[in-house]
């Protein structure tokens, strides 16, 4: 009888504990928000494009959504793509759209864009040369070696459009891949004739080398074109729709902070982009979109189609993550 009473009491405790454990699991796994996953690894480049990621971290916007975000620095977004496909990282911040849309087009990657990171503004991604270079105009780039971060990506796409608009033949420009942090050294040593570089490296190179601008990389016809964003795989967003929506909400709030107050950007840049506060205060910032806009994003696809970078005509809408109600 004593054993029977113990068993009855134990069963009673377990019966009461089960609903509590379920509630506790929900709190633990999703901060009380029912998220499928709460700890995310985000690969991030040291660019102004990804400022919102660091603003969201600083302002605890992820935490408010029940998320813990671990940021993993990378020099190029393509270096993180295999890890994204394998699931070793959950998202990439500052992913250039051209490379990732090409991977989608080839069937290498099923892409999901959660948020736009940056759009081109005037003088935020320019072609620089050394002070005594004989390159004076865009036309002078023909036959010259120009550094870009990644071949056949958003840089080449937008710069080629600008060159064509200025009666320059882009096929005569010799692009070479050099990571942004190494571009200034390559230019100084004469390994390249010019560099197509983005902030904050642009202002830093001008300050240290006295480099001058040959081409405004944010001029027409590409002003306002989306250049990079926050991407995941469709498998990740499909398996984790609530988590994806929570990340998207946090990032869009951070994008709004970045767009509304450049001081927010200046505060975080030295913490991840390895530039001093003085440079951070004078750099040219990109646009920080506060929504995921299909019409705006389609501009990238249209440019890629016209440049022959996609085999198939792509509709951007299925690639954009839309949370369910």
Image: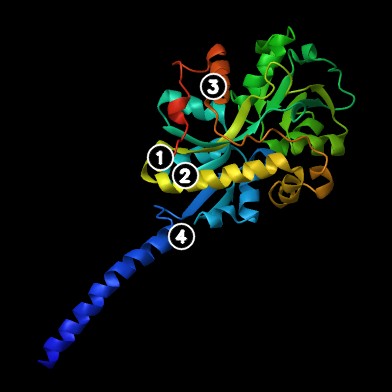
Answer whether residue 308 is visible to the viewer in this image. Answer: no
Q: How is the image coloured?
A: rainbow
Which residue position holds label 3?
A: 298
Disc on the earlier residue, 1 or 4? 4
Percent from the top left, x then y, of residue 82? 47, 39
Side of 267 where 3 appears, left or right:
left
**Inter-mark Cα distance, 4 to 2:** 14 Å
Whether pointer 1 and pointer 3 mark residues with C-beta atoms closer than 8 Å, the reply is no
Side of 52 where 189 appears, left or right:
right
Whether pointer 1 and pointer 2 mark residues with C-beta atoms closer than 8 Å, the reply is yes
Which residue position holds label 2?
A: 245
Mark 1 lies on a secondary structure that is loop
Nearest the eye: 298 or 293:
293
- Whether 167 is drawn above or below 264: the answer is above
Mark 2 lies on a secondary structure that is helix
Side of 217 where 318 appears, left or right:
left
Disc on the earlier residue, 4 or 2? 4
Disc on the earlier residue, 1 or 3? 3
Mark 4 lies on a secondary structure that is loop
**Inter-mark Cα distance, 3 to 2:** 22 Å
- Whether 37 is drawn above or below 178: the answer is below
Which residue position holds label 1?
A: 324
Mark 3 lies on a secondary structure that is helix
**Inter-mark Cα distance, 1 to 2:** 8 Å
């Amino acid at each position: 009888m004593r054993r029977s009473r113990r068993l009855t009491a134990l069963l009673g405790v377990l019966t009461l504990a089960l609903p509590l454990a379920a509630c506790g699991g929900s709190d633990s796994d999703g901060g009380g928000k029912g998220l499928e996953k709460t700890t995310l690894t985000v690969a991030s480049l040291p660019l102004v494009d990804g400022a919102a990621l660091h603003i969201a971290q600083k302002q605890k916007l992820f935490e408010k959504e029940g998320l813990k975000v671990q940021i993993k620095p990378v020099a190029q977004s393509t270096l993180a793509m295999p890890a994204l496909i394998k699931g070793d990282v959950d998202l990439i911040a500052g992913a250039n759209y051209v490379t990732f849309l090409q991977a989608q087009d080839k069937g290498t990657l099923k892409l999901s864009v959660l948020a736009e990171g940056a759009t081109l503004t005037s003088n935020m991604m320019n072609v620089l040369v050394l002070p005594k270079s004989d390159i004076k105009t865009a036309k002078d780039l023909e036959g010259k070696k120009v550094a870009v971060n990644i071949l056949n990506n958003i840089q080449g796409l937008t710069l080629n459009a600008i060159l064509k608009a200025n009666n320059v033949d882009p096929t005569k420009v010799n692009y070479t891949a050099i990571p942004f942090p190494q571009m200034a050294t390559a230019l100084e040593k004469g390994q390249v004739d010019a560099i197509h570089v983005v902030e904050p490296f642009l202002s830093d190179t001008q300050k240290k080398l006295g480099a001058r601008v040959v081409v405004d990389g944010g001029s027409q016809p590409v002003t306002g074109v989306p250049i990079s964003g926050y991407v995941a795989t469709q498998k990740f967003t499909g398996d984790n729709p609530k988590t994806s929506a929570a990340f998207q909400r946090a990032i869009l709030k951070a994008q709004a902070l970045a767009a509304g107050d450049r001081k927010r950007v200046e505060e975080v840049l030295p913490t991840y982009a390895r530039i001093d506060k003085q440079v951070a205060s004078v750099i040219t910032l990109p646009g920080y979109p506060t929504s995921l806009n299909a019409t705006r994003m389609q501009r990238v696809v249209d440019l890629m189609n016209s440049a022959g970078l996609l085999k198939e005509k792509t509709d951007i809408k299925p690639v954009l993550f839309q949370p369910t109600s």
